[in-house]
Image: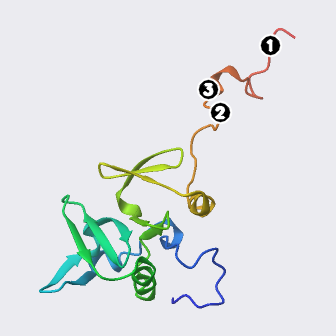
Amino acid sequence: MKKTRNDKTTRNDNIGCKNHSCSGACMFKLLELRGVDEIKMVPIMDVAWIEADDYCVLFHLIDGSVTCHTVRLGIFMERVLKNECLIFRRIHRSYAVNVKHIKGRIHNMLQVGNELLTISDSYLDDFNKDVIVVCNPDNKSPKNKKSPNNKDKDK
């Protein structure tokens, strides 16, 4: 199913997985990264995060290598979306991350590989919409609370 301009999305440059999981189709796609002297083929799942640097985009791969190519981050995100590969999430004007490589989060910082990347205020609300919190927000233990089934038997 292709997205149209009439779909309800909060930002055009945020790409998250459908139903919080990749359909699997994009896992086998290759990026054709054109340099001055060579064309490099990189499996899209090997890209951990992407950094914009003026008119160049730095692709940070999971093996620790970085490759630079002359394309704008917004154009890259549009092309990925057109191919229905929905694993990249824009978190900053200068960063997009592969959600499959997010290891953790501390407030507005994401750990992707060994790097800590800032989620900017303008992207934080959209990012939080895709996060499911599975623990108590207060970090209070529920064992101090009485269950409705465990009423005092002394009464």
User: What residue sits right under mark 2 in the picture?
Assistant: 138
In the foreground, 49 or 93 = 93
Q: Is residue 135 left or right of residue 92?
A: right
Residue 67: x percent and y percent?
Answer: 22, 71
Q: Nearer the viewer, mark 1 or mark 2?
A: 2
User: What residue sits right under mark 3 in the picture?
Assistant: 141
Q: Nearer the viewer, mark 3 or mark 2?
A: 2
Residue 24: x percent and y percent?
Answer: 36, 75
Disc 1 marks which amino acid? Lys
Q: Secondary structure at mark 1?
A: loop
- Spatial CA span between label 3 and label 2: 9 Å
Residue 102: x percent and y percent?
Answer: 39, 55
Within the image, what quadrant is residue 48 found in?
Answer: bottom left
- Spatial CA span between label 1 and label 2: 30 Å
Colour mapping: rainbow
Q: Are marks 1 and 3 in contact (CB under 8 Å)?
A: no
